[in-house]
Amino acid sequence: MTTSPSPPSRLDRLREQSGHLIGTYGLLALTALLFLVFSLALPRTFPTHDNVSSILSTQSIPAILALGATLPIVTGKFDLSIGYGLGLAHVMVMQLVVNDGWPWPLACLAVILGGTVVGVLNGVIVEFGRIDSFIATLGTGSMLYAVTGWITGGARIVPSPQGLPTAFTDLYDSTFLGLPVPAFYVLALAVLLWLLLERLPLGRYLYVIGSNPRAAELVGIPTRRYSIYAFAGSGLIVGFAGVLLAAQQQIGNPSVGLDYLLPAFVGALLGSTAIKPGRPNAMGTLVAVAVLAVGLAGIGQLGAQFWVTPLFNGATLLLAVGLAGYSARRRLRTGATPAPESLSPTAPTGDSSPGNPP
């Protein structure tokens, strides 16, 4: 005679609910806690409008790049070319505007479209070449770095004494409602990706591909096509970040993009442990970038040495990977994986996204 399992006790339910709340909002609470701690330690410099504006401005490009890295990660793949692509994109903007005399809007549009093309090529190589995304994008990234060196000759692109057009530099330098405009770019991009991933069938299919590619194929989802879409979206975002980097630095530096690669992946991977624990998501990435921004700003104002920043980023990356793996395993244990038949492209698209089975 078999006995049915006993229902969970009230204490078990309380533990489950508290674990869910910590997983969902833990990073957000940590951001507030870090801000409070540094404000108490540095009352004259940290909790000020100028400092907040500086954090929002300097961390806008890493945040945009982290959101770009999130898209391929949703499908279970990595795009390691984003740092190299960022370097090439901002150099190309400077090359077209300074050396070739292009109007800056046309140059920016060409670079963003070029970034999209690079993303498509990454996706084609990964999907049709059947090459692991880690290796494939590392190879294409090295080629992008070579193109950057070929264009610049290893030297910086410096504008004329008249400088760059004011309208172009205002893309980064201007303010809105008393805050830097780049912060609103980040917010708008995060909301756009949230809508794409959480509210549209395209996002649902991307999540299915990332969680179980074989099941996605069985229900008729064209996995190759949607994976290429994810890489293309990442490339487009990288191109946009390159435009902002050119407007920020106002000089073409062929090696600057690599500095953004690690922070971008730290933000994207750490973001998969927040808001929607166990899966990459735009709002989680935004919260993760906020944690990193406040932490780096605080330790910088406390007088930390230059090597503390890469140490912080590296340690946080290891922590992010560990927490992301734990969140994914916990999500599987709680039975949050949807049945494949509920994810068929012909099925109703109400609220049957991965993690929210009907």
Image: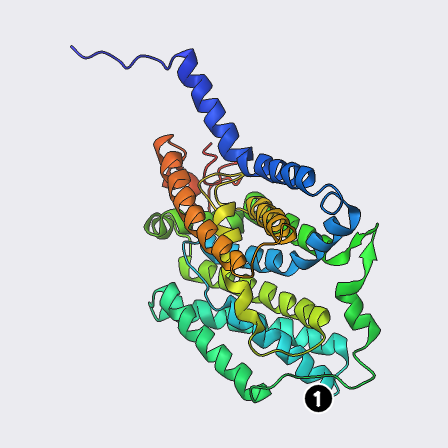
| Of the pair 106 and 160, the residue shown nearer to us | 160
Helix, strand or loop at label 1? It is helix
Residue 74 horizontal side relative to residue 183, left or right: left
Can residue 279 be seen?
yes
Nearer to the camera, 141 or 205:
141
- Relative side of 208 to 203, left or right: left
Residue under the image location 37 percent in, 15 percent down: 8
Q: In the displayed structure, would residue 154 be above or below residue 321?
A: below
Looking at the picture, which amino acid does disc 1 mark? Asn
Crowd around label 1: few <14 · some 14–19 · many ≥20 (10 Å): some
Find disc 1 in the rendering and name its residue.
99
Residue beneath the point at 81% across and 77% down: 165
Total count of labels: 1
Nearer to the camera, 301 or 6:
301
Residue drawn at 40 percent across, 35 percent down = 331
Residue 71 in sight in this render = no
Q: Position of residue 216 (x, y in %)?
A: 38, 50
Residue 24 percent location from the top left of the image: 53, 34
Scheme by which the image is coloured: rainbow
Q: Quadrant of the N terminus?
A: top left
Image vertical order of residue 54 relative to residue 195, above or below = below
Image-based side of 131 in relation to 85, left or right: left
**Residue shown at 49%/60% (left/top)?**
262
Tell me the quarter of the picture where residue 305 sits: bottom right
- In the rendered view, does 355 fall on the left or right side of 174? left
